[in-house]
Image: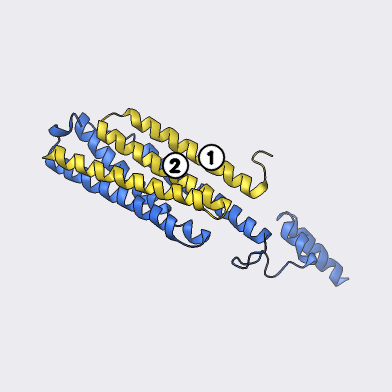
Chain colours: A blue, B yellow
Amino acid sequence: MNQAADLPIWAALLIAIFLLIGAGLTLIGSFGFYRLRSFYDRIHAPTLGTSWGTAGIVIASIIYFSVVESRLVLYQLLIGAFVIVTTPVTLILLSRAALYRDRAENSPDVPPLDVLPLAPSENPSRTSNPEKAPITAHNNTHIGEK
Amino acid sequence: MSAAILFWAVTIAQVALAIAMALALIRIIRGPRAQDRVLGLDTLYCNAMLLMLVFGIRTSNSLYFEVSLIIAALGFVATVALAKFLMRGEVIE
């Protein structure tokens, strides 16, 4: 807070607004994470903190350091970009792991794995190479004509 | 005047982030299953990272930025490894 007295008042107001938006949204997200009932509800709540919570605090930090150092400081965007890229990856992996664990226990809360299991005759056409698929189809029609 | 505005905003933001970390910690302790605890750890990491950014604004020191970047990277790796462990039973196979 040693250089904070030199700040113009519009910068202080902007920093305060973005800080309060970011911290408040993070608090709301964590409260939802504490409060909601099932895991699949709870996995949505902390993303409030990782989307606009992080963005608000990063914008406040960019404004503060840009005004204090009187040049454009943008390195906080690195954290914002990193969090925005990595949060969906971790949450997809975690929700797939949770779904796998619930299905392994035959939990009634999650849908089963395959509603309509594949017939065995469909499997080679699904898994075959798409370049080879017209050839086999042609062979099949050729055999059929005979 | 601007120092007072900034001081109170930073203080309120720090208290809010500390309460958010406490709520995530309660969920880690109480969480009925393992995936709740892993998600709580992820939330705790993210809140600690934001708290470090607010510390950087408070002390006007850009050293805290690197601390929060390291916390973000470690949190990502830890959550991915724990989710992989929950899914497969081992991390590297």
Q: Going by the image, does A54 lie left or right of B5?
A: right
Residue under the point 67% across and 47% down: B88
- Residue A104 in sight in this render: yes
Q: Nearer the viewer, residue B1 or A75?
A: B1
Q: Going by the image, does B17 lie left or right of B27?
A: left
In which image quadrant can residue B52 be found? top left
Disc 1 crowd, CA 10 A, few/some/many (<14, 14-19, 20+): some
As drawn, the label of residue B45 is 2
What amino acid is at disc 2? Tyr
In which image quadrant can residue A105 be found? bottom right
In which image quadrant can residue B11 be found? top left
- CA distance for labels 1 and 2: 10 Å
Task: Give coordinates of residue A57: x percent, y percent.
Answer: 31, 43
Q: Is residue A43 above or below residue A112?
A: above
Q: Going by the image, does B69 lie left or right of A107?
A: left
Task: Give coordinates of residue A40: x percent, y percent.
Answer: 52, 60
What amino acid is at disc 1? Ala
Q: Quadrant of the C terminus of chain A?
A: bottom right
Which chain is indicated by disc 1?
B
Residue under the point 45% across and 50% down: B26
Q: Nearer the viewer, residue B72 or A129?
A: B72
Task: Give coordinates of residue A63: x percent, y percent.
Answer: 24, 39
Residue under the point 64% across and 56% down: A101
Q: Going by the image, does A29 lie left or right of B77?
A: left
Asked if the residue at tag 2 contacts the one at tag 1, i.e. Cβ–Cβ closer than 8 Å, the answer is yes
Which chain is indicated by disc 2?
B
Q: Quadrant of the N terminus of chain A?
A: top left
> Element under label 2?
helix
Residue pointed to by mark 1: B78
